[in-house]
């Protein structure tokens, strides 16, 4: 913050000090300024310019001596003897600062080993750092020693596994109390960080149960929230809303329909995508029912969320239970992708990042204005080297300590290309089949366009997937709440038939189609996710004239389109039983009744569940729906139509597939169409789901349905 105090001094470059002097004090005029070091020595500072600025301040630009040592304490004194601490400000954003203070070691954080515990905090602009440690509820305060690259260290001669600690940082003339920005666990509501030794938290490992995963397009993603998935009592899932809910198998509704983790396994997806499970800010961990939030408000990136644990004030337990959840999925043969939000924090001013190294971690303009591409009043500056290192170390922590299998990046377009490519390289070095994908929207962050990790730069990130909004908008219809009535192809607008040719091939060809991606694995195909109205609620608005039976068919049609498309299919939990949020467009902080999975709908719409399960199995069975290259798609896929209404998706000249040719017919109209064949073909699926061992010479393509046939 600038222009808050009467007199402020900011070191904004290695030879530049910016002064703000209130015009309420001597009309904001001073003829001389001096730098005073910790020994009391004064050095006169040259004035290079001044101007009147907003907020009733005068701004002076002064020269700074080469002798300034970053981390030492200085004051600036003006001619009337008013003094102010010299703040290490925009100098932290310079390339020289990044080079001088980049620390590549892997020992930051707190490491209990044997009979001692080592603390290491990167705080290059701090003058002093003290660590406050709680041993058997007794507080001890220890001075830390500054070492190379601005890393403060202290060795405590005791193994502090499970103990609490805080940091006190003297920086820019004031003491800041902070939790550890890279803490591994925490006490309830971020009261203090906790020392954790992962090697002492044993959880049975089931990674051996994971089936082979060769190509990214073999994935079928299923997004869920820890809280939403098990919160409804009718699901009969113990430990509702907790990590541990996923450790209970074979749960059912009173009517005998499967729920919980066994339901997910039976559905047949390959990966679950867990909405934020790190520690977030806006749910009171000791009063969980009082507040609701999805968790896109990061607080402690390397700490499991306390409201998802059975006792949030037990830091070892929250780590153990999060590990147990991941392994419960692995036991069922399901991989786990973690939803991460490295683009912003909940509140910059109270963030450990800002308290420990002010100005460094957040993206700013040349004048110091905060970037707001995330629309959350701050953007993490991923192209600063220690921010990039933090993101990489955090991802490594979740992969090594918790065994997660990949990451979904929220608002990935706020981050930079180089960081994302390094995340891929590191993740694949730990797990060769790791998935990395995210929201590649072009966000208005303060970063050169060619550096943003968005879809426009997808060619620079060949191994990263992006949520395909072209697919979403043309299959389902417009998502914006102001356009809720605008239909897509599968909801009834046949004018979008040509656009479907592009969507069904993952937008990776550039002949007469819309090309967005180089390869199909870069396209995450979806019509619904946690954001925006559910597809069922969308259908209720854009197709109000439809009876329930018609709406069900359209819901199945959209799910079917996802599962036969080239690219990576994505399903939002409950979509397969017509999930509703009662029209809520953005339910990020709505109540449990709005967001929880309704397991009674799972009973009511079981036909859609069975259809989804069948189409998932068909996709797994037929490799032609999972082509791995644009070249293969170009060679083996063609499109046509029936009366420019029914889409004909023809996969032909297929090799290494049980069928040499497959036809997919998508009919979004109220008409019945008929298709005959010169020879018998095998009917693989229709509105009833998968069909086995049934040969036909003609098919009826019923209203609002998809028909799939294959010939050998």
Image: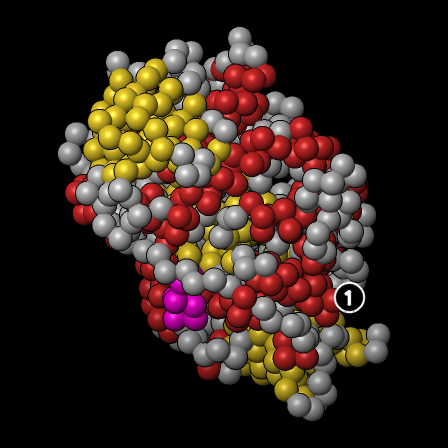
Can residue 415 be seen here? The reply is: no
Q: Nearer the viewer, residue 557 or 655?
A: 655
Q: Residue at x 58, y 74 (%)?
A: 109
**Residue 124 in the image: x percent, y percent?**
49, 72
**Residue 534 in the image: x percent, y percent?**
55, 29
Magenta stretch encompasses residue 557? no
Q: Nearer the viewer, residue 283 or 688?
A: 688
Few, some or many C-alpha atoms within 10 Å of disc 1 (few <14, some 14-19, many ≥20)? Answer: some
**Residue 674 in the image: x percent, y percent?**
33, 17
The residue singled out by tag 1 in the image is 314
In the rendered view, tell whether residue 154 sits above or below residue 192: below
Q: Residue at x 73, y 49 (%)?
A: 251
In the rendered view, tell whether residue 128 sits above or below residue 498: below
The magenta span reads 428-434
Q: Residue at x 40, y 34 (%)?
A: 694
46 on left or right of 377: left
């Amino acid at each position: 913050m600038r222009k808050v105090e009467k007199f402020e001094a900011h070191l904004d470059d290695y030879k530049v000090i910016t002064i703000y002097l209130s015009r309420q004090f001597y009309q904001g005029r001073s003829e001389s300024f001096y730098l005073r070091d910790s020994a009391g020595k004064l050095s006169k500072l040259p004035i290079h310019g001044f101007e009147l600025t907003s907020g009733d301040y005068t701004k002076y630009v002064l020269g700074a001596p080469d002798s300034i040592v970053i981390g030492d304490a200085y004051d600036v004194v003006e001619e009337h003897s008013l003094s102010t601490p010299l703040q290490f400000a925009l100098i932290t954003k310079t390339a020289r600062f990044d080079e001088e203070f980049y620390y590549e070691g892997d020992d930051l954080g707190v490491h209990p080993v044997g009979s001692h515990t080592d603390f290491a905090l990167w705080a290059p602009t701090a003058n002093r750092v003290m660590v406050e440690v709680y041993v058997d509820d007794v507080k001890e305060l220890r001075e830390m020693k500054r070492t190379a690259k601005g890393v403060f260290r202290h060795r405590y001669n005791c193994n502090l596994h499970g103990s609490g600690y805080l940091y006190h940082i003297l920086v820019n003339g004031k003491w800041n109390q902070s939790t550890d920005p890279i803490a591994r666990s925490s006490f309830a509501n971020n009261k203090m960080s906790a020392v954790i030794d992962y090697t002492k938290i044993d959880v049975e490992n089931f990674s051996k149960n994971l089936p082979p995963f060769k190509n990214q397009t073999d994935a079928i993603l299923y997004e869920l929230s820890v809280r939403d998935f098990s919160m409804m009592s009718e699901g009969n899932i113990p430990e509702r809303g907790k990590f541990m809910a996923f450790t209970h198998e074979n749960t059912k509704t009173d009517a005998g329909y499967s729920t919980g983790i066994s339901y997910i396994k039976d559905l047949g997806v390959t990966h679950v995508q867990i909405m934020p499970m790190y520690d977030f800010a806006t749910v009171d961990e000791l009063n969980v029912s009082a507040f609701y939030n999805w968790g896109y408000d990061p607080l402690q990136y390397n700490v499991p969320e306390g409201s998802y644990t059975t006792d949030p004030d037990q830091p070892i337990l929250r780590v153990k239970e999060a590990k147990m959840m991941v392994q419960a999925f692995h036991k069922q043969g399901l991989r786990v992708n973690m939803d991460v939000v490295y683009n912003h924090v909940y509140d910059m001013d109270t963030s450990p990042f800002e308290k420990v190294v002010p100005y460094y971690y957040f993206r700013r303009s040349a004048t110091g204005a905060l970037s707001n591409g995330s629309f959350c009043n701050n953007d993490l500056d991923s192209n600063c080297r220690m921010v990039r290192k933090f993101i990489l170390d955090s991802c490594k922590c979740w992969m090594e300590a918790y065994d997660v299998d990949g990451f979904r990046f929220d608002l990935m377009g706020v981050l930079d290309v180089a960081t994302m490519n390094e995340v891929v390289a590191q993740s694949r070095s730990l797990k060769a089949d790791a998935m990395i994908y995210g929201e590649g929207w072009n966000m208005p962050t303060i970063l050169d366009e060619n550096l943003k990790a968005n879809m426009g730069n997808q060619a620079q990130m060949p191994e990263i997937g992006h949520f395909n909004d072209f697919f979403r908008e043309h299959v389902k219809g417009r998502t914006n709440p102001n356009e809720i009535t605008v239909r897509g192809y599968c909801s009834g607008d046949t004018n979008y038939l040509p656009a479907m040719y592009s969507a069904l091939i993952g937008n990776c060809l550039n002949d007469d189609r819309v090309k967005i991606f180089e390869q199909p694995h870069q396209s995450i195909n979806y019509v619904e996710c946690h954001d925006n109205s559910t597809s069922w609620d969308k259908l209720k608005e854009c197709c109000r004239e439809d009876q329930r039976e018609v709406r069900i068919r359209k819901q199945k049609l959209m799910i079917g389109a996802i599962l036969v498309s080239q690219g990576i299919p994505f399903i939002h939990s409950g979509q397969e039983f017509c999930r509703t949020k009662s029209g809520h467009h953005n339910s990020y902080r709505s109540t449990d009744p709005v967001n929880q999975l309704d397991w009674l709908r799972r009973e009511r719409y079981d036909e859609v569940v069975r259809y989804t399960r069948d189409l998932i199995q068909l996709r797994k069975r037929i490799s032609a729906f999972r082509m791995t290259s644009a070249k293969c798609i170009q060679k083996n896929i063609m499109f046509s139509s029936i009366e420019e209404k029914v889409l004909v998706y023809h996969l032909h000249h297929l090799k290494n597939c049980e069928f040499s040719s497959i036809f997919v017919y998508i009919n979004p109209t109220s008409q019945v169409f008929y298709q005959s064949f010169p020879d018998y073909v095998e009917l693989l699926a229709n509105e009833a789901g998968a069909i086995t061992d049934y040969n036909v010479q003609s098919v009826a393509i019923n209203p609002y349905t998809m028909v799939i046939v294959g010939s050998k």
